[in-house]
Image: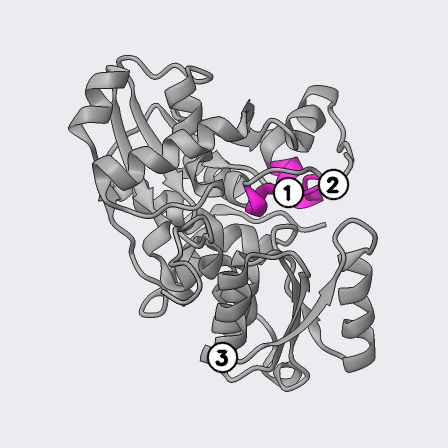
C-alpha cells in the first residue's frame, strides 16, 4: 500500500494546472457573527463536474501509462466520482465505464452519460460494486480508478486544501465531509505540509459513521449500508490509504443528523445564493449544530459539491 506524500501533492497540482478550476473561497459576515469566528468556505461546488472529485480523477487518469489507456478506466460511484472520472477520461481520450447504483441521483447519472461514459447499474443494498468493477477490469484489461482508496486520488484531493491555505492564509482547522476518507486524508496530508498547526476534522452523517468508529477502535470498521440524504458519504468502510493518513495526522471525526444538512443547504441558498449538495453541507452543519466549536478561530470549510436533485420541479404539464 503506497501512501501519498507532499511531493505527490505538488505533482498533482502541476497535472491539474489548466484543467481543474482554482475554486473561490467565500465568506459570510452573517455566519461569522453567528459563530464568533472567521469562516472560509472553499467552493468545490464550482469545480468542473460540480465537485472536488474532479481533482483526484484527473490526477489518477493522467497517471495511467499511455500504453494502457486505450483499454479504458473503470470506476464505481454514486455520482460525483462517476462524473469526475467520465470527464477526466474524456479529456485524455480514454474510454470510461462507471458502475453506479440504480438509485443514484438522476442529475448525476445524466451528467455522467453526457461526458460519454458507459454506465452499468447495480443494487447498492444487495450487490457488491467493487466486485463488479474488478471483474470489468480483469475482462477488459482496464485500469481501476477508485473513488478514495488510492494514493493518486488522495493526492489530487489534497490540492483543494493546498489552494485554500494559499487563498485564506493560516487556519486553525479545516472541516470536510467524510465518505471513504479520500478528501479528509488529502486535507490532513496538506495541512501537515503547509499549515501544521491546523486540525483536520471530518464530518459524517450520523447514520453512517464508519470512519468515526474506525478511528475510535484503531482499525477499519465495516457498517451496514447507511441511509442518508448525504449520498456522497454513504460508504460502509473507510479506505485503507485514507485511514492510514487519518491515523498518522490525528484527524478527528464528528457526525450530524440529516436535518442539520437541510438547514445548512437552506443557509447557503438563502444567505449566500449558492447551491451545495447535502454531502457538501456536512462541514457547515457541524458548525451550525455546535458539534464543532469555532469561536475565535479561523476555520476552513470544504463545500465538496453542488450536484443534487433536492430542487423544486414544475408539476407535470406545467
Q: Secondary structure at mark 3?
A: helix
Q: Is residue 237 magenta?
A: yes
Tell me the crowding category of disc 3: few under 14, some 14 to 19, or many 20 or more residues within 10 angstroms, Cα based: some
x and y, in percent, of residue 159 in the image: 40, 51
Q: CA distance from mark 2 to mark 1?
A: 7 Å
Write the residue at 51% across / 44% down: 183
Read off the residue under disc 3.
Answer: 90
Q: Secondary structure at mark 1?
A: loop
Q: Report whether 23 appears left or right of 110.
A: left
Foreground tag (1 vs 3): 1
- What span is in magenta? 230-245
Q: What numbered label is drawn on residue 103?
A: none
x and y, in percent, of residue 315 in the image: 41, 58
Q: Report whether 67 appears left or right of 298.
A: right
Whether residue 245 is situated above or below residue 70 in the rendered picture: above
Report if the CB atoms under discs 2 and 1 are less than 8 Å apart: yes
Q: Nearer the viewer, residue 312 or 65?
A: 312
> Which of pointers 1 and 3 lies earlier in the amino acid sequence?
3
x and y, in percent, of residue 204 in the image: 56, 31
Tell me the crowding category of disc 2: few under 14, some 14 to 19, or many 20 or more residues within 10 angstroms, Cα based: some
Residue lying farthest front?
Answer: 317
Q: Report whether 160 appears left or right of 97.
A: left
Q: CA distance from mark 3 to mark 2?
A: 31 Å
Q: Is residue 101 magenta?
A: no
- For residue 303, what is the image quadrant? top left
Read off the residue under disc 1.
Answer: 234
Write the residue at 56% across / 58% down: 79
Q: Secondary structure at mark 2?
A: loop
Write the residue at 69% across / 32% down: 210
Whether residue 76 is situated above or below residue 212 in the rendered picture: below
Q: What numbered label is drawn on residue 225?
A: 2
Amino acid at each position: 500500500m503506497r501512501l501519498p506524500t507532499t511531493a505527490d501533492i505538488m505533482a498533482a497540482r502541476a497535472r491539474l494546472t489548466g484543467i481543474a478550476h482554482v475554486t473561490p473561497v467565500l465568506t459570510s459576515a452573517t455566519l461569522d457573527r453567528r459563530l464568533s469566528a472567521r469562516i472560509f468556505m472553499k467552493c468545490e461546488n464550482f469545480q468542473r463536474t460540480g465537485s472536488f472529485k474532479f481533482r483526484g480523477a484527473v490526477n489518477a487518469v493522467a497517471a495511467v501509462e499511455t500504453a494502457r489507456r486505450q483499454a479504458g478506466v473503470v470506476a464505481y460511484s454514486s455520482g460525483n466520482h462517476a462524473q469526475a472520472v467520465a470527464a477526466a477520461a474524456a479529456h485524455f481520450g480514454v474510454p470510461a465505464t462507471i458502475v453506479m447504483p440504480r438509485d443514484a441521483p438522476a442529475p448525476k447519472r445524466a451528467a455522467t452519460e453526457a461526458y460519454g461514459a458507459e454506465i452499468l447499474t447495480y443494487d447498492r443494498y444487495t450487490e457488491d460494486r467493487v466486485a463488479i468493477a474488478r471483474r470489468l477490469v480483469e475482462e477488459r484489461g482496464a485500469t481501476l480508478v477508485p473513488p478514495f482508496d488510492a494514493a493518486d486520488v488522495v493526492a489530487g484531493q489534497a490540492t483543494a486544501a493546498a489552494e485554500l491555505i494559499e487563498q485564506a492564509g493560516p487556519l486553525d482547522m479545516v472541516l470536510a465531509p467524510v465518505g471513504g476518507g479520500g478528501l479528509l486524508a488529502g486535507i490532513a496530508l496538506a495541512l501537515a505540509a503547509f499549515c501544521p498547526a491546523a486540525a483536520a476534522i471530518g464530518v459524517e452523517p450520523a447514520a453512517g459513521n464508519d470512519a468515526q468508529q474506525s478511528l475510535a477502535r484503531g482499525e477499519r470498521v465495516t457498517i451496514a449500508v447507511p441511509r442518508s440524504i448525504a449520498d456522497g458519504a454513504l460508504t460502509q468502510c473507510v479506505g485503507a490509504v485514507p485511514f492510514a493518513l487519518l491515523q498518522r495526522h490525528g484527524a478527528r471525526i464528528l457526525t450530524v443528523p440529516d436535518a442539520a444538512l437541510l438547514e445548512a443547504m437552506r443557509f447557503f441558498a438563502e444567505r449566500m445564493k449558492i447551491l451545495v449538495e447535502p454531502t457538501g453541507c456536512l462541514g457547515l452543519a457541524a458548525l451550525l449544530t455546535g458539534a464543532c466549536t469555532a469561536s475565535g478561530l479561523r476555520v476552513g470549510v470544504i463545500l465538496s459539491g453542488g450536484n443534487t436533485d433536492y430542487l423544486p420541479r414544475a408539476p407535470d404539464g406545467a
